[in-house]
Amino acid sequence: MKVFIIHGSYGKANSNWFPWLKTELEKRGHTVFLPQFPIGIDKQNLTSWLKIIEKYKKDLDGAVFFGHSLSPAFILYLLETYKAKACFFVSGFLDFLDNKEYDTVNSTFITHKFNWKKINENCSKFFAYYGDNDPYVPQESLSKFVKLVGVKPLIIKNGGHLNSETNYNEFPQLLNDFRTIE
């Protein structure tokens, strides 16, 4: 199976639980892509990320996607064109966060008018995870996201933003849930 793991705003491909998950999935025989996308106030936008993902165009259709923070919005955009076997969304949102630094770089991703009909035609298996005390994304935004996607979330007590700041350098629940679609 082809799998994409996509970081969020100001993120790095070699941080959080991403390298661990890549290693675990490769041990199971899957092809895993962990691209580094442009980050920063003058580099991060939907257009620049689409230029990077264009390199993987032949591998996108039918892939499994893991996205953290902003990247679930990016993945939803991709689902308007490509089919996915499943999507795993961690701390996903589609709102402004009332944080100028993040709202500026996130704006082109979250202001897109999503074609939910097409998204749901192209993927029917969604998983969502978020911490009950996320310091970056308000609980209302997380709740709104899962409602729009139509998925029941796994809410993790004291999970924060489910990143290395809260010791999420490994995320066994993702691997366990992935096994249900193998």
Image: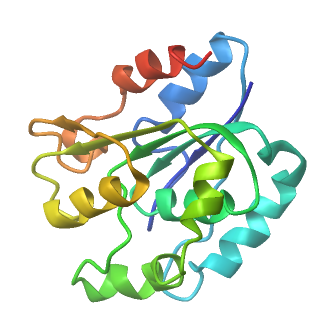
Q: Is residue 58 left or right of residue 63?
A: right
Closer to the camera, 96 or 27?
A: 96
Name the residue nearer the viewer: 11 or 62.
62
At 39% from the left edge and 41% from the top edge, which residue is drawn? 16
Q: Please report the residue visible at 38 percent of the width from the left and 70 percent of the height from the top.
A: 94
Q: Position of residue 167 (x, y in %)?
A: 24, 35
In this rendering, would 153 be left or right of 135?
A: right
Seen as rendered, the residue at the extreme right is: 58
Look at the picture and state if 25 lies above or below 67.
above
Whether residue 65 sits left or right of residue 126 in the image: it is right
Q: Using the image as rendered, state which of residue 109 and residue 168 is in the foreground.
A: 109
In the picture, residue 85 is in which quadrant? top right
Look at 61% across and 20% down and name the residue there. Answer: 25
Residue 138 in view, yes or no: no
- Assign the N terminus to one quadrant of the image: top right
The relative height of residue 30 versus residue 149 in the rendered view (above or below) is: above
How are the colours assigned in the image?
rainbow
Give coordinates of residue 39: x percent, y percent: 54, 72
Q: Is residue 117 something one can see in this rendering?
A: yes
Q: Give the residue furthest to the top.
A: 28
Q: Position of residue 99 (x, y in %)?
A: 24, 83
Instruction: Specify the quadrant that holds the C terminus.
Output: top right
Quarter-of-image position of residue 148? bottom left
Image coordinates of residue 89 in percent, x first then y, are: 43, 46
Residue sitting at 83 percent across and 63 percent down? 54
Q: Is residue 32 above or below residue 66?
A: above
